[in-house]
Amino acid sequence: MKARVFVSFKSTVLDPQGQTVCSALHGLGYQSIAAVRQGKCFDISLADGVTREQARKEIEAIAHEVLANPVIEEYRVEILD
């Protein structure tokens, strides 16, 4: 079983890297792009025998305590088969 954790800035937090990418895209002629927000993606492999419920609980804790800064970032956890 695998898990995927997406971490990104909260919508209220300035994202200068996303703004830079958006500006670069405009410079390349992609004028239809209104905004870009950047983030991080973590793919995590889980040991055999872990239940889906155990995996979700543990990955949620890891995402909150280690992978994301809950003051300025939000995260989403997906458990994959």
Image: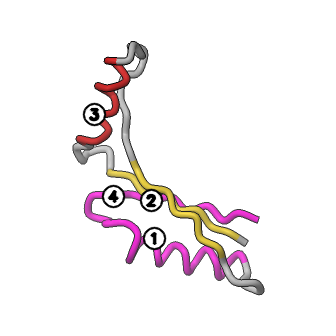
C-alpha gap between disc 1 and disc 2: 7 Å
| Residue at the farthest front position | 28
Contact, mark 1 vs mark 2 (Cβ under 8 Å): yes
User: Looking at the picture, does residue 6 appear above or below residue 13?
Assistant: below
The quarter in which the C terminus is drawn is bottom right
Contact, mark 3 vs mark 2 (Cβ under 8 Å): no
- Secondary structure under tag 4 reads strand
Contact, mark 4 vs mark 3 (Cβ under 8 Å): no
Label 3 or label 1, whichever comes before in sequence order: 3
Q: Which mark is residue 41?
A: none
C-alpha gap between disc 4 and disc 3: 17 Å
Label 4 or label 3, whichever comes before in sequence order: 3
Q: Name the residue under label 4.
A: 73
Q: Mark 2 points at which residue?
A: 75
C-alpha gap between disc 3 and disc 1: 25 Å
Q: Specify start and end residues of the magenta stretch as a single range.
A: 52-81
Which amino acid type is shown beneath numbered disc 4? Glu
User: Looking at the picture, does residue 69 appear above or below residue 73?
Assistant: below
Which amino acid type is shown beneath numbered disc 3? Gln
Label 1 or label 2, whichever comes before in sequence order: 1
Q: Mark 1 points at which residue?
A: 63
- Secondary structure under tag 2 reads strand
Residue 53 image position (x, y, % from top left)? 68, 78
Q: Mark 3 points at which residue?
A: 19
